[in-house]
Amino acid sequence: MYFNFLINSNVIVGNGTFRNIHKIIKQYGYSYPLFLVAEGFAKSNLWKIVFKKINDNFNKTKIIIISAKTEPTYNSLRRNLAEAKKTYCDVIIGVGGGSCLDTAKAVAVLIKNKGDPVIYRGFNKIKKKGIPTICVPTTAGTGSEATYNASFVDEKSNIKMGINGNNMFSTLSILDGETIISCPQFAAIGAAVDALVHIIEGYSCKNSNEFSDMFAEIGFKYILKSIMDLKNKKVDINKRLNLLKGAYLAGIVSMNSGSGVASAVSYPLSVYYGVPHGIGGGIFLLYVAKFNYSKKFDKYKYLTRYLKFKKNNTSLSVINYLQNIFNKLGVPKKLNRFRIYKEDYNNLNKIMKTQQATFDQNPTKFTVKKDFKKMIKNFL
């Protein structure tokens, strides 16, 4: 079987690494760092410790605070790009969740590529390499630090379309379990569920291949082994690092094999209704898995080797196991949590018409006109 596999594996993995990022910056030969830091993480004790070291080692370090209250838009990208251009920098460091990291990667390339950001929507329209970037995720979910994607909402069309391509990879990523400890619990759960959505859908979609399957299975093992630590009051930093490893691998899986119905549904929900992307995908993931299983798709059963069932090593046992995990994590089962009700039914069907191309990546036929209409009724 012929397939193309994309990967950028320049990553430092280890707890406590971020505390020494000033040394890493110098080791790579950079002298003028520009930091884009997520608003929430900027208030953490860890950032205060690191920020002092940065100020002690670099002159006039520029910090841009990135808001994660809403989905990143092309207007917010324009504002952050304009702010970044006010100072000279030889490396951009993104420290935050997916929105922050996407912004850091996009700002880095747009400093070197002239024109409005929207002209670069799509794939491989960035022709010049950008300023080197270092991505430090503070949530374990999107996998932005591993991918060549940066997603933004176009306010005019209300469509989320990214700047993607080979020049969008970060130069370096740092995975450190300590950086995700300060993430609020619901956001942390949403991020981890997002990573599982990437893995399960990437594992099952039509474009999956033996390499993406290998990364998916290892990522699945890392996440399932550690995800319940998100409910513990006492943090296990090694399990948090496992979540970051799983999310990193999930990003690679999604980039190489594609996504599916749950991910596709979550995008309009986030744009039009403000549903957190990871949770949005998680709400529908297992319904779609059961739908696929009912259509004789049976690949999920191979994940049982990482769940240590004594018997019943079936696809349905995997789906039920994940449902139990989602129940314990408090993943919503209804959209009324986000003020979406039965009266929104017609509008939901309308805004999902743009998603059929992604639905087509599902291993079994799933249409907006028939199957989405039936599915969405279960969640209203």
Image (cartoon, helix red, strand yellow):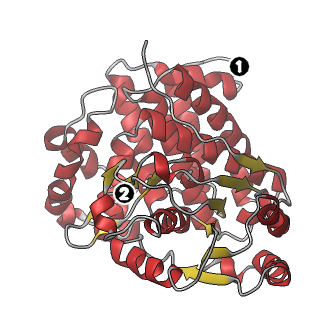
Instruction: First in sequence, mark 1 or 2: give its number.
Output: 2
* Residue 160 appears in the picture as rendered: no
Gap between marks 1 and 2, in whole Å? 44 Å
Q: Badge 1 local density, few (<14 within 10 Å), some, or many (20+)?
A: few
Is 78 in front, or is 269? 78
Furthest residue to the top?
A: 1
Q: Indicate the amino acid at tag 2.
A: Gly
Q: Which residue is denoted by mark 2 in the rendering?
A: 162
Q: Which residue is denoted by mark 1 in the rendering?
A: 310
Q: Badge 2 local density, few (<14 within 10 Å), some, or many (20+)?
A: many
Q: Residue at x 36, y 55 (%)?
A: 266
Please say if 250 is above or below 48.
above
Relative placement, left or right, of 97 versus 371 is: right
Q: Indicate the amino acid at tag 1.
A: Lys
Q: Quadrant of residue 181?
A: bottom right
Q: Position of residue 143 (x, y in %)?
A: 56, 50
Q: Residue at x 57, y 20 (%)?
A: 302
Is 136 in front, or is 299? 136
Q: Quadrant of the C terminus?
A: bottom left
Relative placement, left or right, of 290 versus 217 is: left
Pointers 1 and 2 in contact (C-beta within 8 Å): no
* Residue 8 appears in the picture as rendered: yes
